């Protein structure tokens, strides 16, 4: 029988891109027989194995995006972020069988959004004559994964660090692409930014609920970050207060982030 567990296992351990895109009818798929699985590197096709550090390339500078190759490289990097986001969501479903239904269902919905995002990037890369895997990929988002031993830590890393940062990065890249007349890539970044508000919102709701009356949500967030993450990773150079407010982060939290 297909369960959330088997879906997440196939997405996480599958070594083809097709498995990463595996769909799930969340209304009709039972969430039973979930069992705890600790982190191990996800399955990947041969073309998407993590590259040796020396072979990896830096994200191109925004000032270089008039060059089509630099835009393609940038989009390739972002596509890999989406693939890692898919895998981190599948991992959460495998790692926290005891988490409340609201957490598991929320993560499952985010996983499906990340699959949609990856497809958008793959379609855009095709326009540049590229496929995911044509360039070396890194494991940046995986590094903290073994340390995420509770749902709150997962939320603080994934929703409230990687995705919160995208509330600044995605609109900034929409502007960069637009400034070099690549309106399609700009539109893609705007779609991502809009969805990211929901994803950060999911994390913000969970964090706010876990915050005791005498506590500050920002302190709880910082206290649940793992070795590889710091709050400064959760923001870009341009700080979007408005998108954070729309995500439901509280004023004190936003002010603390802004002051970093
Ligand atoms: Fe995404
Ligand atoms: Fe996301």
Image (cartoon, helix red, strand yellow):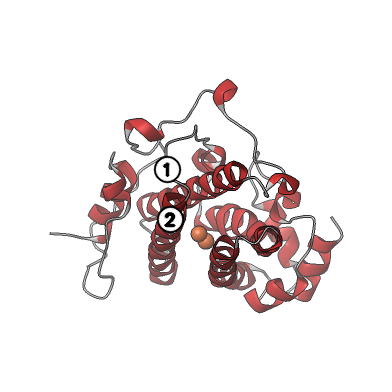
Q: In terms of image quadrants, where is residue 16? A: top left
Q: Are marks 2 and 1 in contact (CB under 8 Å)?
A: yes
Check the image and report above or below for 121 versus 46.
Answer: below
Label 2 CB-ligand 1 distance < 8 A? yes
Residue at the location (67% across, 63% down)?
A: 178
Q: Is residue 241 left or right of residue 67?
A: right
Name above or below for residue 142 compared with residue 85: above
Q: Quadrant of residue 207?
A: bottom right
Q: Is residue 156 left or right of residue 22?
A: right
The residue wearing badge 1 is 132
Is 216 situated above or below 231?
below
| Residue for point 44% across, 48% down | 83
> Residue 16 or 157: which is nearer the viewer?
16
Q: Is residue 72 left or right of residue 181?
A: left
Q: Helix, strand, or loop for circle 1?
A: loop
Q: Residue at x 40, y 49 (%)?
A: 91
Residue farthest along the right direction in this orientation: 259
Q: Nearer the viewer, residue 12 or 150?
A: 12
Between the residue at mark 2 and the residue at mark 1, the CA separation in whole angstroms equals 10 Å
Q: Residues within 10 Å of mark 1 (few under 14, many from 20)?
A: many
Residue 52 locus on image (x, y percent): 52, 23
Residue 94 image point, x, y percent: 35, 51
Secondary structure type for disc 2: helix
Count of number-bearing discs: 2
Residue nearer the viewer, 182 or 28: 182
Checking the image for residue 118, the label placed there is: 2
Residue projecting furthest to the left: 1
């Amino acid at each position: 029988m297909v369960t959330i567990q088997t879906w997440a296992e196939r997405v996480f351990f599958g070594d083809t891109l097709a498995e990463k895109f595996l769909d799930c009818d969340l209304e009709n798929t039972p969430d039973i027989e979930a069992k705890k699985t600790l982190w191990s590197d996800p399955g990947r096709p041969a073309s998407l194995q993590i590259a040796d550090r020396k072979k990896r390339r830096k994200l191109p500078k925004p000032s270089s995006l008039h060059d089509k190759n630099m835009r393609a490289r940038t989009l390739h990097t972002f596509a890999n972020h989406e693939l890692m986001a898919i895998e981190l969501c599948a991992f959460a479903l495998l790692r926290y069988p005891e988490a409340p239904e609201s957490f598991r269902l929320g993560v499952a919905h985010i996983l499906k959004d990340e699959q949609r995002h990856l497809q958008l990037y793959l379609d855009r890369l095709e326009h540049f004559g590229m496929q995911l895997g044509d360039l070396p990929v890194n494991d940046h988002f995986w590094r903290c994964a073994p340390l995420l031993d509770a749902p709150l830590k997962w939320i603080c890393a994934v929703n409230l660090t990687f995705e919160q940062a995208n509330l600044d990065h995605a609109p900034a890249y929409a502007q960069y692409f637009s400034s070099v007349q690549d309106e399609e890539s700009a539109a893609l970044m705007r779609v991502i930014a809009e969805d990211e508000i929901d994803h950060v919102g999911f994390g913000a709701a969970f964090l706010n609920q876990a915050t005791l009356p005498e506590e500050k949500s920002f302190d709880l967030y910082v206290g649940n970050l793992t070795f590889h993450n710091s709050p400064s990773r959760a923001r870009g150079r341009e700080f979007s207060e408005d998108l954070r407010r729309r995500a439901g982060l509280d004023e004190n939290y936003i002010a603390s982030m802004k002051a970093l």
